Image (spheres, rainbow, N blue to C red):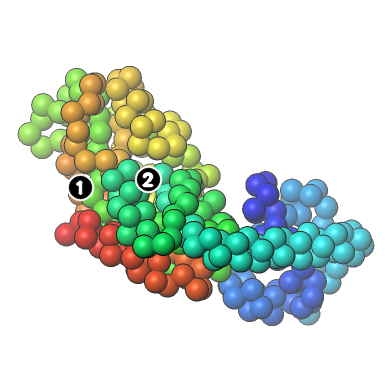
Amino acid sequence: MAVMDLLRHLRFFVAVADEGHFGRAAAALDMTQPPLSQGLRRLEQHLEVELIHRTSRGARLTPAGRHLLPRARLLVDDADRLLAESQRLARRSGTVRFASTTALPARLVTACVTALRGAEASVSTTLGATVDLIAQVRAGVCDVAVVEHPALVDGVEAGPVVKLPRWLVVPADHRSTTTERPVFPMLAGLHFAHPPRSANPPAFDAVVDLLRERGLDTPVLAAPDDRSVLAAVAAGTSFGVIATPPTPTPGVAWLTLAAQSVALRVRVIRRADAATHAEAVDRVLYRERLR
């Protein structure tokens, strides 16, 4: 379990212990109850100990939970103080902390950074998996981020979903490149090069379901970003979907196939006090949207 997730789930544990009820704890954390309950179970699995005994009347601490609660509370409080101090330093330095999913093409990442850069402000940029970026914004270590949709965005402010063009990339010598009307089943026999499911389970499941609906059920090859996808495709064993526009690339051919269905869906998430930054990034994405 990543450190960011551990702190988040410890916060769940402390909230349930304080409230004695999952529903009230979820309300206090400004989230729904199912992800709270699931997060607590993941924490218990990670620690290999039961912390909360669930009853029809609410929730009560187990002996292990009572023993570990003070340490959990200390970690959560220390994390809050660390975040508050980092936010104070960021505001004093005028730095906007921006993050983007690796699925966003480089030209849009740089366009977002340019839009965020004010006359006297600098921009620090992080690229990563959607689940990690949501955790960073939720924890307050990032101001605004572009993430893939669908994703679980509880605990953050989220903007509208924007569809961006995305293309299929296949080996240059694949038979689909010489067919007037290629279809997905023609890609059978190739692996699907795509970021791993752990990067964002909802979006991963959505694209795999789309391929199956189109008659293609193929093994997935983990490829964390567009460059990794292109390398796998050039090797002749895989196909992928990327938001990088068609560019002369050895060993790779671009196909426009089911453009609306394979579009990259993204949205801007932000901290509560970063509305202006989010609006600037939204304007960049809106100009590039798939019409």
For residue 141, say whether it is visible: yes
Q: Which of 261 and 186 is in front in this view?
A: 261
- Residue 67 — which label? none
Secondary element at tag 2: loop
Does residue 206 sit above or below 225 in this rendering?
below
* Point 42% across, 51% down: residue: 100
In the image: residue 204, left or right of residue 46:
left
Secondary element at tag 1: loop
What amino acid is labelled 1 in the image?
Ala
Label 2, on which residue?
A: 103
Q: Nearer the viewer, residue 21 or 226?
A: 226
* Point 51% across, 73% down: residue: 272
* Point 20% across, 23% down: residue: 172
- How far apart are labels 1 and 2 at the CA level? 18 Å
Residue 281 x, y percent position in the rendering: 34, 62
Graded by Cα atoms within 10 Å as few (under 14), some (14 to 19) or many (20 or more), the crowding at tag 1 reads: some
* Point 69% across, 75% down: residue: 25
Residue 19 x, y percent position in the rendering: 76, 78
For residue 189, say whether it is visible: no
Q: In which quarter of the view is residue 217 placed?
A: top left
Q: In which quarter of the view is residue 231 placed?
A: top left
> Split into 4 quadrants, where in the image is the C terminus?
bottom left
In the image: residue 11, left or right of residue 135:
right
In the image: residue 104, left or right of residue 173:
right
Residue 160 x, y percent position in the rendering: 34, 68
Graded by Cα atoms within 10 Å as few (under 14), some (14 to 19) or many (20 or more), the crowding at tag 2 reads: many
Label 1, on which residue?
A: 258
What amino acid is labelled 2 in the image?
Ala
Name the front one of labels 1 and 2.
Answer: 2
Residue 26 x, y percent position in the rendering: 65, 74
In the image: residue 22, left or right of residue 52:
left
Sequence order check: which comes first, mark 1 or mark 2? Answer: 2
